[in-house]
Each structure stands twice: as C-alpha cells, then as structure tokens.
Image: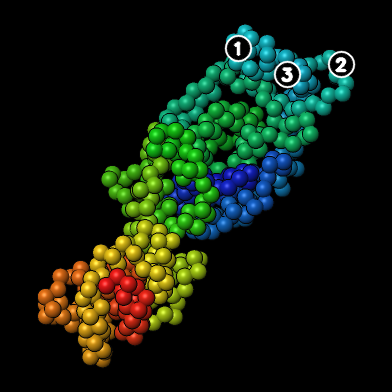
Amino acid sequence: MITTRFAPSPTGYLHIGGLRTALYSYLWAKKNNGLFKLRIEDTDTARNNDEAMKAIIEAFDWVGMSYDGDVEYQSKRLDIYTKYINQLLDEGKAYKCYMSRDELDALREEQMANKQTPRYDGRYRDFTGTIPEGVDPVIRIKAPQEGRITFEDGVKSSMDFAATEVDDFVIARSNGMPTYNFVVAIDDALMEMTDVIRGDDHLTNTPKQIVIYNALGFNIPKFYHVPMINNPSGKKLSKRDGAMDVMDYKRKGYLAEALLNFLVRLGWSNGDQEIFSMDEMLELFDPNTINKSASAYNEDKLLWLNSHYIKNVSNDRLSKELEFFDCILEGHDKKEMILDLCKERAQTLVELKASIDNLLDTPLDYDKKGSKKFVKENTIEMLENYMKLLEENKDTLHLACDYEAITKPFIAEFELKFPQLFQPIRIALTGGTQAPSVYDILAVLGLEESIKRFKQAISVNFNKEA
C-alpha cells in the first residue's frame, strides 16, 4: 500500500512550498487508495511554537486535505528513538564521542585552512582509551567508509554518492535528544512510508538517512525530491513574493481549490491544462513526472484561477465564504442576483465583498471627477423624468430586463446617449462610475431604494454640479 506523509516543523507558519509538498504527497497516496499521514516534527523544543502548530492543522482543515489516523508528534516518541539509539550502541554500529566543542572548532579551522570540507575525523570511532572527564558525549553512527550510497529518485533519477561523503554524524546530542536525520528515518520506517515526497533541499540528508535505514535493517522508501518554488526573477521566494502563511491566502480572499490548483501546476503539468478539479488531480497526478527544474511563482496566474473558481462555485458556497469577511447575504431576498452580478468582476473574495458593499450600502460621498464629467445642466431634470417613468411602471419592474424594456424607449424619446443617462444613474446609486450594468443595479436595489438614492444624490451632489 502506498503510504506518504507530510512532516512539518512547528517553528513557523506553513508556507505554500510546504503545502505543495503536502498536496503532492496527498494526491499520490489517495490516487493509489493508500494512506496519507501528518507528522509534526517538534523535537526542537527551543524553537517550537504552539501557534504555528495550530496553524498547520488549521491550514489542512481549510484546504480539505484529510490525513489518515491521528497526527503524530515526534515529541511523544522519544522513548522509541532512545530504544534504537541503544540498539545501535549495543550492536557496535554507533558510539559515544567525547570530542569537546573546542576540539571540534580546532578541527574545523584546520580543515578549512587546508581547503578541506569540514567533517568529523572519526577519532572516537574505535576508542578504547580513558574517557575524558567533564564531557557529556554525543552519539555518532558508524557510517560506511567505502563504497557508494545510491538510490533512485523519482524526480532526479539515479543518485550516487561516495560513502566517504557521509561522516560519522551525530544521531543524539549530549543531552540525549535525537537529531533530525535519525528521527526522520526511524519514523518513516516505523510508519511504513513507501514514498517520501519532499523539497530538494533535503537531497543531501538522504544518504545519511539511508545509512540509518541500513544500520537498522529497515526498508528504504522511494524518494522524490521536488525542486523549489522561486520568485519571478528566479530567486528564493520571499514573503513579499508569496511565501506567506497559507492562512494569509484565506485572509486575502482566495478559495482553497484555487490555491491547490495553482500549487499543483507549480512543478507538474498535464499538457496545457490549467484548470484541475480535485478529482482530475487525483486521476492525473504522478510524482514521476514532476519537473526537474524549479518553478516560478506567478501571482497573476493565481488571481486568474481564483477569479475562475469564484465564478464557478455555487452562490451558496460563496455566501458562506463571505461570512468570514463579515459580509452576510444569507436570508437576503436577492442573494442570487447580488452574487451573480458582483462575482463577474471579482478576483478575490475581498474584492467580491467590496463590490457587494458598494452595491448595497447607500453612498456617503460621490466620485468628484465622474460627477464633474457627467452631471450637466439638464441631468437633474432628466433623472426626475426617469424617476417618474419608474413610478409609473412600478408594478412591472422586477428583473433587469424589465428596467431595460422601459429605459431604452426613454433614451430614444429624449434623444440621449447611453452615458448621459447611465453614468449619472451609477453615480447616484453607487457613488462611482465603474459599477455593473445599470439595469442590474436597479433590479437588485428595487424601485423604492433606487428612488431614495436618486433623491439623495440630487440633493447632496448633483445640485452642486449642475
């Protein structure tokens, strides 16, 4: 059974690079009717952050990627790690190293002076002398000193490292706390991971983890090291470019499916297809076809996708999403009409809320530039005649087409150009000139509210301009 995992450290927010890795792992497991697990790597107690831990779980809930079983916490598995450290010591596959910090620093300086790669020199590997006093030892694994460490990477193909590139690295610190590469290998083996999909910044960790797998006789999973997401200039993604908390995307008004669609395409493709439902991702995704080169973050693409999903999800769904932004449409008798009208131009839910507010809230001020351009000497008289027309037909005015049916003859009768009537109407009803179709606005607001706004605009604004 295919089993994958996502294993973040709760030392900061979950950013989109992490979410993309999680998405790839989730898709591969679920496509194969396998298991996708969430493990929190929280052994770095000095840097752990409870809020970050909660935010990781919150982000998973928001995007709807359900994990199998309970969340695993490394901090609750320390007894397991100690057991395997002791096993390696007992079997002579690991040893206590009494090298002091000063000795390590001196060795490093000497190696750098000789233009050598800094590495531990193995001086305590087979130590039988007198144990130095006052030094709490670290535990080091006995890495192979000859041969090759090879593995097949699903993204990068065959990987081959000289065994000499891996020194006897530390698997437990002097305080007994196990190190990253050790606990990751133990957890992935005991949790029966078959496939490990992660960023290629972990590529150099893999030979070390394979040393641990081999020392303990564990099965080695298939690795997929995914290239990073860069900014549009090809440099490391910064918070300014989009490497922010995943939940910030929700706060900025993105839909979860738009973000997932965006991320799946950052490093993987299916021809020229841009829009992917979750079902399509599950059907088509294969980590063996992940691009070998880094991908570039493109905010315009994300906005385009978000706009697509805003237009295509149900209005009931939009209504619920808007509640997060304190925009309450549930129970409004014209909810469908309002959303159909406003979502056509919105790229984010924040923009959608602003458009709805602009439509439903009575204007407190009016566009000065637009008023100066479109309010003429005859504008007030024209609007008063138009209001009279609306009143005369009030029993027939319900939909946008009803308003259109009486307005076009009115324009023809008074030999008007469309902007001469429509722009003053927009200014009166919404305060600006960029609102949607006049007929739609009138239908949403209704006759009574529209007349009220006409009169207020004439009193407060149009008398000044005319």
Q: Distance between the residues labelled 1 and 3?
A: 14 Å
Mark 3 lies on residue: 104
Q: In this view, does 451 lie to the left or right of 388?
A: right
Mark 2 is on which residue type? Thr
Q: Circle 3: is it few (<14), some (14-19), or many (20+) Cα within 10 Å?
A: some
Q: Is residue 193 left or right of residue 353?
A: right
Point out the frontmost of discs 3 and 2: 3
Where residue 116 is drawn, which disc sits there? Answer: 1
- The way the protein has been coloured in the rendering is rainbow
Mark 2 lies on residue: 130
Q: Distance between the residues labelled 3 and 2?
A: 19 Å
Q: Is residue 5 visible?
A: no
* Residues under numbered marks 1 and 3 in contact, where contact means CB atoms less than 8 Å apart: no
Q: Is mark 3 on a helix, strand or loop?
A: helix
Earlier in the chain: of badge 1 and badge 2, it is 1
Q: Which of 403 and 58 is in front in this view?
A: 403
Q: In this view, does 208 lie to the left or right of 122?
A: left
Residue pictured at 50% horizontal, 43% vertical = 239
* Residues under numbered marks 1 and 2 in contact, where contact means CB atoms less than 8 Å apart: no
Mark 1 is on which residue type? Gln
- The percent coordinates of residue 313 (x first, y second) are 37, 65
- Quadrant of the image occupied by residue 75: top right
Where residue 390 is drawn, which disc sits there? Answer: none
Up/down of 213 relative to 282, above or below? above
- Quadrant of the image occupied by residue 132: top right
Mark 3 is on which residue type? Leu
Q: Which of 386 and 294 is in front in this view?
A: 386
Earlier in the chain: of badge 1 and badge 3, it is 3
- The percent coordinates of residue 292 (x first, y second) are 39, 33
Q: Is mark 1 on a helix, strand or loop?
A: loop
